[in-house]
């Protein structure tokens, strides 16, 4: 996902941390496969986590996964593909429903998508709140229990349930 046009010149960091209240509202997670030590200390996203040095894509994923992937290509697509195959967790992405990844990976196999009201103000590594991002955010549930977590989260937004996942799995359409 190309978001380079959204990076403000004086803030060139690609490190942006999810507000802890978003993650806490969704329940406990077993694994965050792509965070940093600083981000984990800030939001305690999951019981276990992998940093960029540990390469979460090369590791085995287990349990319920929290995923706020790096938004650069090809990383975002690779993380989302692994999440779709793992099929147990919630991913946070910018609302870019027209892109190829969304159309080919997310829509065919996700169980639900929550379109969040308003924009998330992510945090910088120094703990300061970032300005309003250039796009809204979505939470993507893989697994029906994660759809229930979205519905019960108390977050403002609308949850849309998918009927495509079972059809895609039955027809063997995933990632052909």
Image: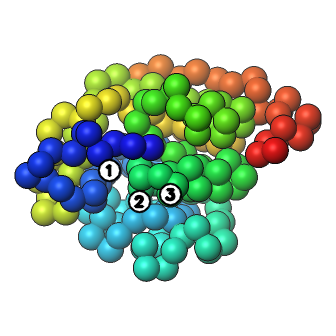
Q: Position of residue 4 (x, y in %)?
A: 29, 45
Residue at image position (81%, 44%) is: 176
Residue 108, x across and y down, in percent: 72, 32
| Residue placed furthest toward the left | 10
- Judging depth in this view, the residue of 15 and 110 nearest the camera is 15
Residue 156 visible to the viewer: no
Task: Check disc 3: other Cα within 10 Å, few if <14, some if 14-19, many if 20+.
Answer: some
Cα separation between marks 1 and 3:
18 Å
Read off the residue under disc 1: 18
Residue underneath mark 2: 45
Q: List x then y, in percent, for residue 137.
A: 39, 33
Q: Is residue 32 above or below residue 55?
A: above
Q: Mark 1 near mark 2, Cβ–Cβ under 8 Å?
A: yes
Image marks 1 and 3: residues in contact by CB distance under 8 Å: no
Residue visible at 48% across and 37% down?
139
Residue highlighted by disc 3: 75
Left or right, residue 112 beside residue 55: right
Number of residues whose C-alpha sits closer than 10 Å to that of mark 2, classed few (under 14), some (14–19) or many (20 or more): many
For residue 45, which quarter of the picture? bottom left
């Amino acid at each position: 996902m190309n978001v380079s046009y959204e990076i403000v010149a004086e803030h060139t960091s690609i490190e942006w941390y999810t507000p802890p209240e978003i993650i806490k509202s969704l329940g406990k997670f077993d694994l965050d496969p792509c965070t940093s030590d600083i981000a984990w200390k800030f939001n305690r996203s999951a019981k276990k986590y992998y940093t960029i040095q540990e390469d979460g894509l090369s590791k085995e994923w287990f349990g319920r996964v929290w995923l706020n992937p790096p938004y650069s290509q090809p990383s975002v697509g690779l993380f989302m593909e692994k999440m779709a195959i793992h099929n147990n967790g919630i991913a946070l992405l910018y609302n870019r429903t027209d892109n190829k990844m969304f159309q080919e990976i997310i829509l065919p196999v996700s169980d639900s998508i929550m379109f969040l009201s308003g924009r998330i103000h992510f945090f910088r590594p120094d703990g300061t709140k970032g300005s309003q991002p250039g796009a809204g955010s979505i939470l993507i549930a893989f697994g029906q229990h994660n759809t229930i977590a979205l519905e019960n989260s108390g977050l403002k937004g609308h949850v849309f349930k998918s009927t495509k996942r079972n059809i895609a799995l039955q027809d063997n359409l995933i990632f052909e």
